[in-house]
Image (cartoon, rainbow, N blue to C red):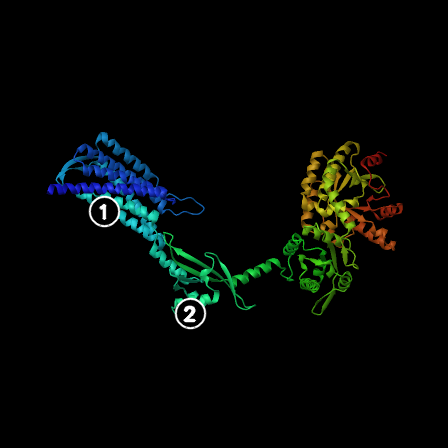
Amino acid sequence: MIWRLRELIRYTIVFIFALLIVILLLCSWASLRSNKPIGKSVCLLCLALIPPDLGNMLIIGTTTKSVALVGCYIYYIGMDLIMYALIRFTNEYCSVQNYKEKKKRIMPIWIDYVLAVDTVQILISIVTGHAFELQEVESYGRPYFLMKPLWGLTAHILVCYAVIAIVMIVFFIRSMKVSLLYKERYIVILISMIIGALWQTYYLISRTPIDRSMLGFGVIGLLIFYFSIYYRPLRLLDNMLADIVSDSKEAVVLYGPEGRCIWANNPARKLTGINHDDFEEVSNTLISLFGDIRKFPEEKDTEITLGALGNEQYYMVTHGKFFDRNNRPVGSYVRVRDITEEKHRIEMEMYAANHDALTGVYNKEYTFKVISDRLKQHALKDYYVACIYICDFKMFNDVFGREFGDAALVQISEWMRSYSDKSCVYGRIAGDAFGSCLPMQAFSQEIVERDLSRFKVRLGDIEQHLVIHVGFCEIEEDDTDVAVLFDRATSALDSIRDDYRRHVAFFDKKIREKMLWNQKISAQLDVAIEQNQIVPYLQPIADKSGKIVGAEALARWIHPEYGFMSPADFIPLFEENGMITDLDKHIWKSACELLSHWDEKFPGIFISINVSPKDFYMTDVLSEIMSYVMKYDIDPHNLRIEVTESSMMRDTDDKMRILEEFRKQGFIVEMDDFGSGYSSLNMLKDMPVDVLKIDMNFLGKSNDEEKSDIIVKNVIRLSEDLRIVSLAEGVETVEQFDRLGELGCHLFQGYYFSKPIPVADFEAMLEK
């Protein structure tokens, strides 16, 4: 009877191991199906725990030495598998992932190689027998084969203990670094590993038959499965969530499944004015304020406004339910958030985003948006769009100061308000311009002309007249683009831009035709350049003897439809829209090509090319011209760079640096229209200029020839003292030519010698 009882104990242990194997298989399956990234590592660890348990089952359950031997090898090789799986799990479970980087390996890679070597040496022991020997002993009344370790098994044990020790160190360090919320799961696994290791050590030292320590490792596997896949620190989470809700600025009220109020946080009590723990009274007060909140749509924010006009309070109220794991309702909640400050802040931000900070009227973006919305609704029949422009506002600011300029803008916006009602839309659309959309019936040209003719800005004791122009464009039925309407109104302004007696202009057929012309001509420029419709005309430049020594290249358009086009029909347009750069490049290239042809036929003849102000901003002038010079292999000395005095008024330092670089490359630099600007003398002392082109307005428009002679004479003398060659342009008579020669001028250009002529005619002049 005792013998059978002892035998039953061994079978019970075998059954426990079998049951543990089944549980581990289920855990591995559940881990693999989980959505957690660590699931695969947990699955591998659970599967790795099965071979040692299976080996123990064979060792404990058999009375045959050969079966016990097979169990031993399964057990020891399985231990290496456990160590490998434990390393992989530790790398996943204990690593910290940066959001920019992948998880970094914690356990050193060489441990994997050591385990591989240990597995190989255990397998070799099947042949060599160097790992262990089996000794037959009696246990529970039946034979039991106890392992006697040799050097191979000793090495195996040391490797396994080393791996477990390193893993426990990693878990210990990690448990010290993590927050309290996660500390529990690391400490429990660490303690279970310590117990398992001690349990295994006990059997190694005591050599007690029937090793049960693998049950401890199985428990470790189950703990790892639980903490990795299912564990949540519920008690700690509950405390934290309770603290969060209690400290929340939102009013939170909880109801039981029967609908009775069971809890309210401090903000809820403050909102309802209930200072004691009568939660039902808190609920009743909420209902009196907001109505029966529990009837509101679930899980949706409902905005409620309380208070009188001008003193409103805004609240966001939400109602929802709690459900258990079986999706049965277990209670409900109400959240009330005071959004008054947020609402006011948003309103202020919206106001700031849509209004001009200085004047308080709409800004450009919002003005255009409101008008555009009304256009889409076809709500602007019999309406004008108006562009209100302050003439010379920059100079006004410079003369009277920024404060006075700001006062002018504010007073103009107030004037607009005085003529506007809810049907009007108006705003500031630029630094010196306002825009408006108003009904035709609200506009009186006579009143606007009268008001603007005597419009004065007042600031303290200072009063100053301000010139304001208004351009109007009638909104037509098919108009949909606000920007186009304001462009039309601005085009109307252009017709009175220099007229200080008129203040109102309308977009009409003549202006429309000009806009269409500009669009048509602009669209044809590329084709005109490609087909050589635009060609250089040359205006001769002579020396004191009247000999032609060079020419200025000027663009002329021989249009296939309109014939010879006046430069006034396209040059100002291209200067305004920036296409002048493409035109200039074509003339630069043509001039270089001519000089290349003249190299032997007309040696020493130069050509002056114009560089427009916008060329400096829209292209690399130096690189562009140098590319043509190198392409046609010409002497830079024969290609003169001509700039106007007015083009140097802005970004002077940058442009001077470019001109100086031209001179270093061998070009001659000319300044055109000298005398037409107000700062010529000031600029002349610094500008890298070789030739000064004198504007003959000095001579042509003066009633006092003696004064004109004195001015021209001193300009020529000044250029000589500065070692600058003087060139008089606009010479039309022999008297002017003789007089300028007597005054010391070096070069001459004008209709006296020739108007701008085609290249063939110029070459004919040179041949004569």
Can residue 532 be seen? yes
Instruction: Kindly state the secondary structure of the residue where label 2 is placed.
Output: loop
Instruction: Kindly state the secondary structure of the residue where label 1 is placed.
Output: helix
Query: Relative to residue 743, is residue 322 drawn left or right?
Result: left
Query: Relative to residue 102, is residue 625 drawn left or right?
Result: right
The residue beneath circle 1 is 198
- Tell which of 211 and 242 is nearer to you: 242
The quadrant the C terminus occupies is top right
- Tell which of 554 and 344 is nearer to you: 344
Can residue 689 be seen? no
Residues packed near mark 2 inside 10 Å, few (<14), some (14 to 19) or many (20 plus): some
The quadrant the N terminus occupies is top left
Q: Above or below — where is 344 with respect to 130? A: below
Q: Which of marks 1 and 2 is in front?
A: 2
Residues packed near mark 1 inside 10 Å, few (<14), some (14 to 19) or many (20 plus): some
Identity of the amino acid at label 2? Ile
**Residue at 26 percent of width and 36 percent of height:** 77
Say whether disc 1 or disc 2 marks the residue closer to the N-terminus: 1
Report the residue that reaches farthest toward the right: 735
- Residue 494 position within the rendered picture, expressed as x and y whole percent measured from the top left: 76, 53
Quarter of the view holding residue 138: top left
- Residue 83 position within the rendered picture, expressed as x and y whole percent measured from the top left: 29, 41
- Residue 405 position within the rendered picture, expressed as x and y whole percent measured from the top left: 69, 62
The residue beneath circle 2 is 274
**Residue at 30 percent of width and 35 percent of height:** 116
3D distance between C-alphas at marks 1 and 2: 59 Å
- Residue 181 position within the rendered picture, expressed as x and y whole percent measured from the top left: 36, 54
